[in-house]
Amino acid sequence: MKSIFTPRNLLFMGILLAAVIYFISTQQFIINILSSYSEGFYKSFLNAMSTALGLNKKDDFADASAMGRVTNLNYFADILEKDPWSLILGKGYRHRYMDMPVLESLVDCGIPGFLTFFGMNMILLKASIREMKKGDNPMTTFLAYFYISYFVGLFTAGRPVDTAYWFVFVVMIRFVGIKYLDRRPLVQKPETSDIVS
């Protein structure tokens, strides 16, 4: 860290930054591309948030995905209020597309399906965090970080019966938490001078 802040390195980084800024400022099409991407992202983020918070009217909402989740959350709340007993065994395989796999596993497969699906994901999350902390094996560390995106997906997209989840389960079960994959320090052979005859 100290070497980064030496005068020579700071001067080099300043010249490099000035060159990049000058290049981008002379290329109008790059500025147009960057501004359109950032504007599009900002618009879709605002539409999703305002739809989720109920600020958009149903007639003029712009984010169909977020509106679908709001509708599904209302459907789930309606089940909890009017028919909570149906959640014990569920309403049946692929009863309703919820776009939130955790909730769908509860609605479709009941408490046993929810405990199995969410429990499996919690076990994989714990194993991933353990692998991230250990960092013994580059492949298992990569898989651990990769799994986090799937864990977030449990609340945002897909179905619990999608093959995408089952492929991840298979890969994680095969490679994460396996002892022989950990890098162990090599045992050094004793030198011949150390051997007592």
Image (tube, rainbow, N blue to C red):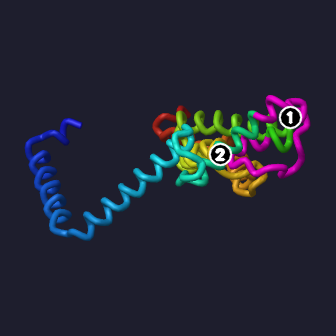
Element class at badge 1: helix
Q: Residue at x 36, y 56 (%)?
A: 39
132 inside magenta stretch? no
C-alpha gap between disc 1 and disc 2: 19 Å
Would residue 73 appear left or right of 186 to someone viewing this image? Answer: right
Q: Position of residue 103 (x, y in %)?
A: 74, 40
Classify residue 134 by image quadrant.
top right
Q: Point out residue 196 in the picture as x, y percentages from the top left corner.
A: 53, 32
Task: Left or right? Give the position of 87 relative to 139.
Answer: right
The N terminus sits in image quarter: top left
Give the magenta range.
Answer: 78-105
Disc 1: CA contacts within 10 A as few (<14), some (14-19) or many (>=20): some
Rendered image: mark on residue 87: 1
Give whichever of 190, 137 is nearer the camera: 137
Residue type for callout 1: Leu
Which mark identifies residue 26? none
Mark 2 lies on residue: 69
Please report contact status of discs 1 and 2: CB closer than 8 Å, yes or no. no
Q: Nearer the viewer, residue 161 or 3?
A: 161
84 drawn magenta: yes
Q: What residue lies at 54% left-to-right and 48% top-to-bottom?
A: 142
